[in-house]
Image (tube, grey):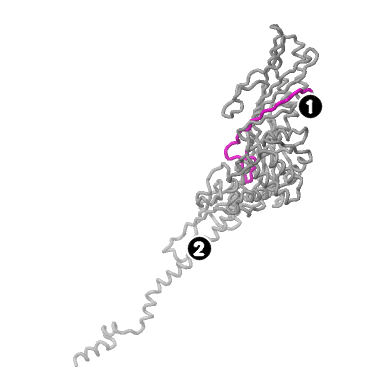
Amino acid sequence: MKTQANDSERSRPGTLAGFWSDREGNIALMFAGCLPVIFGCAALAVDVGSLYTEKRHLQGAVDLAAIEAAAKLDNREAAARGALEANKTGELSSFSVVLGRYTPDPQRSHAERFVEGHEGANAVKVSVTTERPTFFAGAFLGKSVSMKAEAIAATASSATFSIGSRLLAVRGGLPNRVLQGLLGGSVELSAMDYNALLSAQVTLLQQVDALASELNITSGTYQDVLLADASVSDWLSAAAAVAGRNGDTGAQTALRKLIWHTNAERLSIRLDKLISLGSFANVEVGRGNSALGATFNTLELASAAARIANIGNQVSFDIGAGLPGIAKLSIEVAIGEPLQASTWAAAGMPNATIHTAQTRLKAVAEVGGSALLAGANIRLPIYLELASASGRLHSVSCEAGQTNRPTATIAAKPGLLSAWIGEPDPSWTNFGGKPLVAPAQLLTTALIRLKGQAFIQASNKNETLLEFSNADIQNQTVKRTETSNISETVVRSLVRNLSIQAEFGGLAVPLTIQREVAGLLGNAAAPIDEALQPILQTLGVHLGEADVRVHGATCGSGVLAG
């Protein structure tokens, strides 16, 4: 009975015990207790969602700013600010545009692909910080939140250019002599063969794809192709295959003659010294794009490969008689290596650089005497050093804003030209040092001994900007910059500066004989100059000049990277 009474008392309304035991209205009480938490979470969700949207908008604006800055590297900060203002990013607490070089190498981490610095710059990194206010969640997030965004973009503009690639003039069979000296064997190409090689055009993409096929490389990147073991024969076979597919059967036949009648198969070649594909080297084989659509004629491809294969080697040949006033002309050539990371031709973004190889040439001409010197031959030894000329892709832009009309500017600098009338010591083919050049023995008879020496030098300290319009690129126009201080052709300048020392039976040689020697050599200077030009052209170098050609270009906006 007592238990029932106690239970009845606990359940009686109005008592304290009844209040605690009453279960009615639990949900309302719990909801009321949780309401502040719910309001706080809702406020946080609204602010977080708003901030997320703001972050996406800011990142998109920074991406566009980086793309604009990469497209206009010379005016990058203004371009980036303009894009940010156009996308209404508001007031920024920090803003920076850092210039650098981006290398799309899959072997590197994303953080390592962009390197800050002006050297070889082709990309920008845009970084901004801004403060965004909170609406309801100030107690959790503060009155404002600092928001950062960063983007890297590289220029999409590119060009393929070469240096020392003036088109050859076929005369007197001189290119045959040079190519035979470079490739060995017997080169007997006709003028028709050379004209066919000159007219047949091959794109860089066609050549590298065909080379990959020759080397049985079906997967990997174009860089794998350039690093593969290859011969000059492989390179020429690839060019012949492309020429055949393009319907240039004359060029195909001429290239096959070079393969069959020379030692091309035994000459190995460093392909990465021949061409540079820049960022396009990491593209998969067979997936190249229009950026590699630059064209070369097949004679350029053949002679360039022959030169690169002979780096460090000596080539010699005799021109023989046939030049006006010249009884004999013999030539020896030594080809040095270009600067590191340089090639004959390059495809790349602004600041891509190429160099010609250093070249040393020794020519010995014999000139028949007359009058007092009838029956005697005057000997004229000439020694030339042509240091590397360089070219740098300064900029690529779109003509009148049209993306299908690219233009390019190349910063070119001809290398140092040094020329002597004299006898270099036997170490002249060693590019590790400078040879000593002694006075030349011009004439030796029973009674007369003549010695002579002359020296000229020319160089440019600064780069010259060569601008290529869209028409220049389409027409494959060659532009050149020359070394200063040479007012005439090289051999003529040397002969004018020639100092003669003479003896006549132990006595001073009569002035009339000295004048006659000077006159004979002066008359021979022009034919020697004319003979040297096509020889050096075949070797891809020129006397005191840097010849530059833009083979193709693309222009447009920047692209996101990283």
Q: Is residue 332 magenta?
A: yes
- Residue at 72% over, 42% down: 257
Region rendered in magenta: 325-354
Note whether residue 31 is visible: yes
Q: Is residue 504 left or right of residue 115?
A: right
Which of the 4 quarters of the picture holds residue 261?
A: top right
- In the rendered structure, which amino acid carries the disc numbered 1? Gly
Q: Position of residue 381 (x, y in %)?
A: 69, 22
Q: Secondary structure at mark 1?
A: loop
Q: Is residue 3 left or right of residue 81?
A: left
Quarter of the image for the N terminus: give it: bottom left
The residue under label 1 is 322
Q: Secondary structure at mark 2?
A: helix
- Residue at 60% over, 49% down: 222
Count every numbered label the image shows and give the total: 2
Q: Position of residue 502 (x, y in %)?
A: 70, 11
